[in-house]
Amino acid sequence: MTEAEPMFPGARIPYGTWGSSAFPAWQTSPLAEVNIGQFAGEATNRILGLRGVPVSRLDYLVLGSTIPWHRKFWTAPLISLCMDIRIPGYHVEQACATGLQATLLAGAEVQGGAHDVVGVVTFDRTSDSPVGVFPERRGYRRTETISDVWDNFGCDPATGRSMIATAGNTARKHRIDRREVEELTIHRYDQYFAARDSGFLDRVLVPLNLLNIQGRPMGRVDKDLGVRHLTLDSLRAMRELDTCVTSGTQTHTSDGMACLLVCRPEKVKELSSRPEIDITFVGKAEVRADPGYMPEAPALATQELLRRLNMTMDDMVVVKNHNPFAINDAVFARMLDYDWHKMNNTGCSLVWGHPQGPTLTRLIIEALEEAVDLGGGHVLVFGCAAGDVGIASLFKVA
């Protein structure tokens, strides 16, 4: 293998300056009742405090969320207020790819020399997502209403089909067998519970207490509520919603946040508890699959990334992806000739849920922690997003 040049040689992710809330499923926790932007800002302050990083070290924010939240107009000024600092920043959203895209944009901000230490704060609340009314004077009804989460999941404007239809299409195209998909799903759950029981997730997930507007306790967010043990028998008894797709072989909506820092190389020793660990950005690729074949897109993006970098899957020490459908992993294994047993060793969004904005941020954090345990190497993180988009990025831990 020829060593690839870093994409952002002037940017680093300082080890340990990250954290995530647990991702409780839709309507199962107090997160369903709070302003998720305010929660994310306050939670980031708490996480960085536990990591020994004063928020005063940050000079910029890149925010990522996909679902409207109260006072979203203010974005970074509001989040920084909740973090008890006064810095600028901007907001980005790219459906399910948001968490990875926000991290890459933070790397670009640092690489360009505009900022020294950038906070990436990603969050979303699928619970009680807003319903909007839009003037549409060309339409016969004059107004259109939208339930932000459900209507968008239910209809791709390019095809008129739902997200779940893309999974069925792709399963049929690649002749995926339902039995393989169910065995893959059980393996993913086993990986998650093993990581949780070993204490690995305690390094990623930070328990957070929630207060109401009067300052009274509302509850504690410290578990991925909604995750339950599955069996092959229970999966095989589920009704097939589309080819190889059941309620058990797809992810679920959830709420949560996740954050990390990106900084200049000389700042790592000031921020990280283990500054000897060097985490760099190696490369990125994005593609769009054919209409209605979203689960193919991550494999296509990975193929493009490996081609550009002149690398292979054998060069990867950690492989981690956002997999809203178990079919994603089965298709990836076919297209890349890769053993799906070797992916997602510490859990994945198929199991712990999908709050959208922070999903890939948590995956990055878990992947980097796993790579450190393995002594370093190349870390591949990828996923799909609405519109048949695939995104893949490579990091290196040394």
Image (spheres, rainbow, N blue to C red):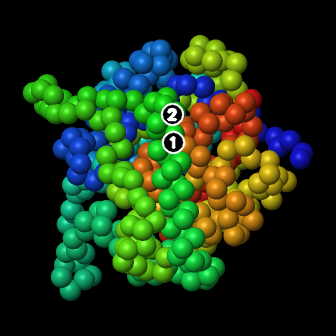
Q: Secondary structure at mark 2?
A: helix
Residue 372 place in picture, x, y as percent: 66, 30
Q: Is residue 357 above or below residue 179?
A: above
Return the residue nearer the eye: 227 or 294: 227
* 332 sits to left or right of 65: right
Q: Secondary structure at mark 1?
A: helix
Q: Which quadrant is home to the C terminus? A: top right
Residue 215 place in picture, x, y as percent: 14, 25
Identify the residue at image location x=59%, y=46%. Answer: 345
Q: Quadrant of the rendered structure where residue 252 is? A: bottom left
Q: What whole-number distance in Å separates the C-alpha atoms at marks 1 and 2? A: 6 Å
Identify the residue at image location x=52%, y=25%. Answer: 17
Question: Taking the image as drawn, is residue 204 in sight?
Answer: no
Give the amino acid at mark 2: Ser
Residue 26 place in picture, x, y as percent: 28, 53
Q: Which numbered dot is residue 11?
A: none
* 238 sits to left or right of 326: left
* 253 sits to left or right of 94: left
Query: What residue is pinned by disc 2?
Result: 198
Give the amino acid at mark 1: Ala
Q: Quadrant of the rendered structure where residue 206 is? A: top left
Q: Which numbered dot is residue 194?
A: 1
Mark 1 surroundings: few (<14), some (14-19) or many (≥20) residues within 10 A = some
Question: Taking the image as drawn, is residue 214 in sight?
Answer: yes
Identify the residue at image location x=67%, y=44%. Answer: 318
Q: How many marks?
A: 2
Identify the residue at image location x=59%, y=63%. Answer: 329
Q: Is residue 247 above or below residue 38?
A: below
Q: Marks 2 and 1: in contact by CB < 8 Å?
A: yes
